[in-house]
């Protein structure tokens, strides 16, 4: 949680949080960053081994996101980001995973002002998981 951060804000659950994991594949490193700053964001970035992210937490906490995460003098060979802004809940009576027009049970929840609840690391898994309490729905999103 918040690797290499020395700011007091990094140690509280009321602020945004970065979770970082890396997996090495051949000569490459696959970096995974989960962020709960403003909106839930998942970033997957590929670099050569030996390069890791440099995170400017002061910029992140001041909502200056552009350039707040960089990889030094290397340019990532691939990257992918996913922003999850909304959670949609509905009664799937047909157990098909489909949302039909006439379904009146649909509820939508914006995922903003997220707070990090906890982290854990299993002995047999090298990547941490974390929970985000979604207070409007009274559930935890586990990643």
Image (tube, rainbow, N blue to C red):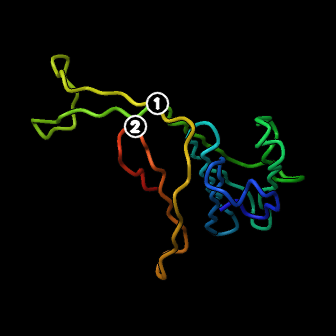
Q: Residue at 80% of width from left, 43% of height from top? A: 68
Relative vertical location of residue 82 with respect to residue 102 in this rendering, above or below:
below
Residue 128 versus residue 63: which sits nearer the camera?
Answer: 63
Determine the residue located farthest toward the left in the rendered image.
94
Can you identify the residue that label 2 sits on? 136
> How far across and down, in percent of the image, does residue 51 sit?
80, 62
Determine the residue located farthest toward the right in the rendered image.
73
Image quadrant where residue 49 sits: bottom right
Can you identify the residue that label 1 sits on? 110
Image quadrant where residue 82 sits: top right
Q: Residue at 61% of width from left, 67% of height from top? A: 23
Mark nearest the camera among 2 and 1 is: 2
Residue 26 versus residue 36: which sits nearer the camera?
Answer: 36
> How far across and down, in percent of the image, does residue 41 sit?
58, 42
Q: In the drawing, does residue 6 fall left or right of residue 40?
A: right
Determine the residue located farthest toward the bottom in the rendered image.
123
Relative vertical location of residue 35 with respect to residue 48 in this rendering, above or below:
above
Q: What secondary structure is found at the residue carrying circle 1?
A: strand
């Amino acid at each position: 949680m918040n690797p290499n951060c020395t700011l007091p804000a990094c140690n509280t659950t009321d602020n945004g949080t970065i979770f970082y994991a890396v997996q090495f594949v051949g000569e490459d490193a696959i970096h995974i960053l989960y962020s709960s700053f403003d909106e839930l964001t998942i970033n997957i970035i590929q670099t050569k081994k030996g390069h890791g992210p440099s995170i400017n937490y002061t910029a992140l906490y001041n909502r200056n996101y552009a350039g707040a995460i960089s990889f030094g003098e290397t340019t990532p060979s691939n990257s992918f980001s996913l922003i999850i802004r909304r959670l949609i809940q509905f009664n799937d009576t047909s157990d098909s995973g489909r949302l039909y027009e006439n379904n009146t049970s649909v509820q939508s929840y914006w995922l903003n002002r997220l707070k990090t609840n906890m982290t854990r690391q299993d002995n047999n898994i090298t990547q941490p998981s974390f929970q985000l309490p979604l207070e409007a729905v009274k559930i935890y999103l586990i990643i």
